[in-house]
Amino acid sequence: QVQLVESGGGVVQPGGSLRLSCAASGFTFSSYGMHWVRQAPGKGLEWVAFIRYDGSNKYYADSVKGRFTISRDNSKNTLYLQMNSLRAEDTAVYYCAKVGGAEDYWGQGTLVTVSS
Amino acid sequence: SYELTQPPSVSVSPGQTARITCSGDALPKKYAYWYQQKSGQAPVLVIYEDSKRPSGIPERFSGSSSGTMATLTISGAQVEDEADYYCYSTDSSGNLWVFGGGTKLTVL
């Protein structure tokens, strides 16, 4: 069965860095583009970043461009999100997701809290 | 930046039809996706590519799109359909994805 398992969340000070990971299983990870989506406490869903199946193209929301980097290692079936220069407004649950089409998969999310 | 606009809330009685709209300038050329999210849970896809229903989603959920507006329709809404609903699509370039602000559906 398909699983997406995020890890790496935690508490970090403003200006700090964190790297999230998402381990995929149960589907051909290397064949699909992948997204990061976040949800601040009590707020709506916000798309963060997308990477193509082979890592050739990456796209970011304006709110994170220049601070976050999405990447993937298809040999390890793992998606990453490197987050630098973190701000209080980056506090959210971060989901990795394969979206588009009928086969739509989401992880359970990992909480990132940016606070001094 | 591109935006998708949804009403903040919709309220219906059980058995009535609920309609949630999503407007965006690129929707005439880009598919809309609809997600249901219940408190504390990850989103669940209920409609993809404007009007297709994933397996396991009840037939009372349907979608349509015309011009700059996509619509999620729940025919005969049930109490268990109470949730937040989000539309999701891309801008005209297809490279930037956006969620609508979400619509809280109340069924009571």
Image (tube, rainbow, N blue to C red):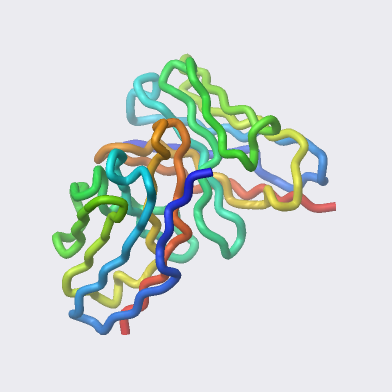
Q: Quadrant of residue B80?
A: bottom left
Residue A20: x and y in percent read: 62, 35
Q: Nearer the viewer, residue A83 or B62?
A: B62
Rendered position, B10 above or below B39: below
Q: Height in image: B83 above or below B54?
A: below
At 35% from the left edge and 72% from the top edge, which residue is drawn? B82
Res B77 → quadrant: bottom left
Nearer to the camera, A94 or B29:
B29
Give left or right: position of B72 versus A113. left
Residue at (40% x, 60% y) in the render: B37
Residue at (41%, 27%) from the top-left corner? A33
Q: Is residue A69 left or right of residue B5?
A: right
- Position of residue A90 in the picture relative to residue B10 (left or right): right
Instruction: Identify the residue at image location x=50%, y=25%.
Output: A78
In the picture, which quadrant includes the C terminus of chain B? bottom left
Task: Specify the quadrant that holds the N terminus of chain B.
Answer: top right
Image position of B57 with respect to A2: above or below: below
